[in-house]
Image: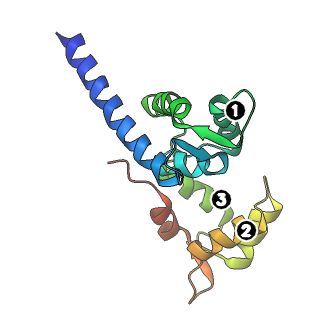
Amino acid sequence: MADDRSREGTETAVAEFHKKIKEAFEVFDHESNNTVDVREIGTIIRSLGCCPSEGELHDLIAEVEEEEPTGYIRFEKFLPVMTEVLLERRYRPIPEDILLRAFEVLDPAKHGFLSKEELIKYMTEEGEPFSQEEMEEMLSAAIDPESNSVHYKDYITMMVIDEN
């Protein structure tokens, strides 16, 4: 009895995932032929609440690409792989408390903000550097224009995906 209920729950979840995956895929299927440009796969995956690293994204693309890559991904190959990713809850976003601790490490005086200059320095000189385009995109969302700084608690709240 419990197994039947569990199976029904899984089947319901799979049906919901299939619907979400199809809707996300169709946004980028401009020719309505069940294919999307391989360069759109990251956007589709992220729109489904997943946050893979660039390496993980490349691995996923390799898994759904044709043996002879065409530059396009077929829905029939994408659907089972993405369904498995969602069922296994892979590539979950980083929790809010961990993001906060990361920003606090960069703010030893505990001001609650970083200047634009500090943020640019950290994001371009430390770890895996951001590209100019990534930096501009982040700054446009993160910087408070009045203070020219990032109030990181507000920024984290804006960035975090609500899973409820």
Graded by Cα atoms within 10 Å as few (under 14), some (14 to 19) or many (20 or more), the crowding at tag 3 reads: few
Residue 16 location, quadrant? top left
Q: Earlier in the sequence, mark 1 or mark 3?
A: 1
Q: Nearer the viewer, mark 2 or mark 1?
A: 1
Q: Would residue 136 appear left or right of 111 to someone viewing this image? A: right
Question: Where does label 3 land, which residue?
Answer: 105
Q: Is residue 128 visible?
A: yes
Structural distance between the alpha carbons of marks 1 and 3:
36 Å
Q: Is residue 111 visible?
A: no
Above or below, 57 relative to 68: below
Q: Would residue 13 appear left or right of 49 to someone viewing this image? A: left
For mark 3, give the secondary structure.
helix
For mark 1, give the secondary structure.
helix
Question: Where does label 1 land, which residue?
Answer: 62
| Residue for point 50% across, 61% down | 159
Count of picture labels:
3
Residue 52 drawn at (x, y percent): 60, 43
Residue 136 drawn at (x, y percent): 69, 73
For mark 2, give the secondary structure.
helix
Question: Where does label 2 land, which residue?
Answer: 133
Render colour scheme = rainbow
Structural distance between the alpha carbons of marks 2 and 1:
25 Å
Residue 84 drawn at (x, y percent): 48, 27
| Residue for point 73% across, 73% down | 118
